[in-house]
Image (spheres, rainbow, N blue to C red):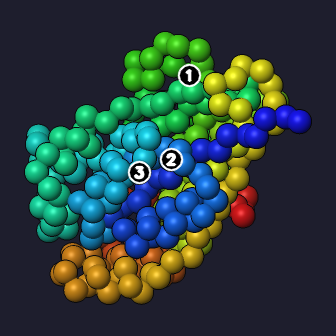
Amino acid sequence: MGRLLDRVALISDVHGNLTALEAVLADIDARGITRIFNLGDYVGKGPRGREVIDVCQARCEVNLLGNWDDFLPDPTRTYDNEALAWWLAQLSPGQGEWLRALPFSYDFVMSGRRVRLYHASSGTVHKRVRFDHDEEEFLSMFRNTPLTGDGPEPNVVGYGDTHDPYYEVDRERRTLFNTGSVGNCMDDPTPIYVILEGVLDSLEESPFSIQFVRVPYDVEAELAFARAVGMPAWDEYVSELRHGIYRGEMGLPEGPGYHRRPRVLAPAS
């Protein structure tokens, strides 16, 4: 009888939505999964970045840097508005420094595949690669850069940032997938995360799977909390959390780091 396969849960883009994070973690726990890797963007857009960081520090084995995590607490940034100031002030002392010091990427082996995780692209957390990328953008996601290091190049890459899940494989068996977002998913606003299943730390080919999981949660409770604490950009939060409609499509202000919603290439279960 073969060994049981290992499972790792991948979460990304919680964006201060503690209600969604707690629902996703409860689902992960119910499945008996103990290893959780976080692909970044803990803060911004939602009201509880501080609490999300606390939970992820306690629960996630791997925590990676996101674009909001780099931008929001940057002491040299010059752009500011009411919402950014509010989200930054909500963090506990030292949390901004913790965010900006997070590693850029994480590599491991599973079922004979070399897997690399990062937030947005292989060279920076501030370059967005959407589902409708061209071939050069696709290939660039697998290349080594000064930030990923010069180890073996991956043949499986998982990332977040765009808030839209998808899965793609080319003829060389390179696999690219986007985890979607736990706290701010577009199109279908139901939180989503990914389960990788295979044999960890094994270079021998064996069964390997990527599963997308949608987890319903109490969105009205999350919105009520954001309103009660006076979070700016509440209307924008409503359009995204209730309807999965990106705030830019509602004629609302975008600001840096916001995500223009593309069409989804293929539905995720």
Instruction: Please say if the residues under marks 1 and 2 sit with CB atoms less than 8 Å apart.
Output: no
Instruction: Please say if the residues under marks 3 and 2 sit with CB atoms less than 8 Å apart.
Output: yes
Foreground pick, 20 / 186 = 20
Going by the picture, which residue comes out furthest to the front?
A: 1
Tell me the residue at 25%/34% (across/down): 101
Amino acid type of the residue tagged 3 in the rendering: Arg
- If you read the primary sequence from the N terminus, does the residue marked by circle 3 or circle 2 appear first? 2
Q: Is residue 134 above or below residue 251?
A: above
Residue 43: image location, x then y, percent: 30, 57
Which residue is identified by label 1? 143
Which residue is identified by label 3? 59
Q: Secondary structure at mark 2?
A: strand
Q: Is residue 58 visible?
A: yes
Which residue is identified by label 2? 36
- If you read the primary sequence from the N terminus, does the residue marked by circle 1 or circle 2 appear first? 2
Residue 71: image location, x then y, percent: 24, 46
What is the quadrant of residue 228 in the picture? bottom left
Q: Secondary structure at mark 3?
A: helix
What is the quadrant of residue 90 in the picture? bottom left
Disc number for residue 168: none
Q: Nearer the viewer, mark 3 or mark 1?
A: 3
Q: Quadrant of the N terminus?
A: top right
Amino acid type of the residue tagged 2 in the rendering: Ile
Tell me the residue at 44%/65% (across/down): 21
Foreground pick, 70 / 30 = 30
Foreground pick, 35 / 116 = 35
Left or right? Give the position of 8 relative to 171: left
- If you read the primary sequence from the N terminus, does the residue marked by circle 3 or circle 1 appear first? 3
